[in-house]
Image (spheres, rainbow, N blue to C red):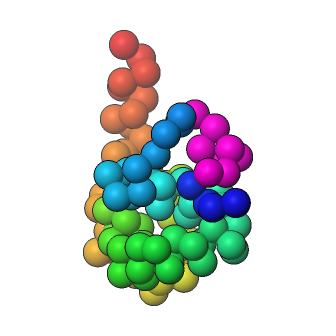
Amino acid sequence: METIDKKHLFWDVEKLDSQKDAKFIIERILALGDEEDFKWATDFYGKNKLKEIVRESRNLDKKSFNFWSQFFNIKKEKCTLKQSPSLRLLFWKR
């Protein structure tokens, strides 16, 4: 089964376009995928695209972000700043 057809990764999406939805697909694989999924993403998108997504993503959870930034040897200063927890709390208090 091809990675983008796996329901445990994309349970909330009916149809994916591997080019248009590349950022979403890569973020899901980096957060929830296994070794086979990572290999598929690396072969399909290339290592540089995965590194770019790690640097720019605001959707990766902290654990995944820390792991992949270490894996790809990306300095955290080079990454997009995440929204501060206090700003997120303001949103939820409305």
Q: Main secondary structure of the magenta part?
A: loop
**In this rendering, is residue 64 above or below 77?**
above
Report the front residue among 84 and 48: 48
Q: Quadrant of residue 48?
A: bottom left
Q: Is residue 24 visible to us here?
A: yes
Image quadrant in which the C terminus is located: top left
Q: What residue do we see at 41% from left, 17% from top?
A: 93
In the image, taking residue 68 as reference, residue 80 lies left or right, namely left
Q: Quadrant of residue 50?
A: bottom left
In the image, taking residue 23 as reference, residue 32 lies left or right, namely right
**In this rendering, is residue 43 above or below 19?**
below
Whether the magenta-drawn stretch holds residue 8 is answered as yes
Report the front residue among 4 and 64: 4
Report the front residue among 62 and 49: 49
Q: What residue do we see at 51% from left, 64% from top?
A: 65
Span colored in magenta = 5-12
Report the front residue among 33 and 16: 16
Residue 73 coordinates in the image, percent (x, y): 45, 86
Image quadrant in which the N terminus is located: bottom right
Residue 42 coordinates in the image, percent (x, y): 50, 78
Residue 18 coordinates in the image, percent (x, y): 42, 57
Q: What residue do we see at 34% from left, 46% from top?
A: 83
Whether the magenta-drawn stretch holds residue 14 is answered as no
Looking at this view, name the residue that lies furthest to the front.
1
Q: Is residue 63 visible to us here?
A: no
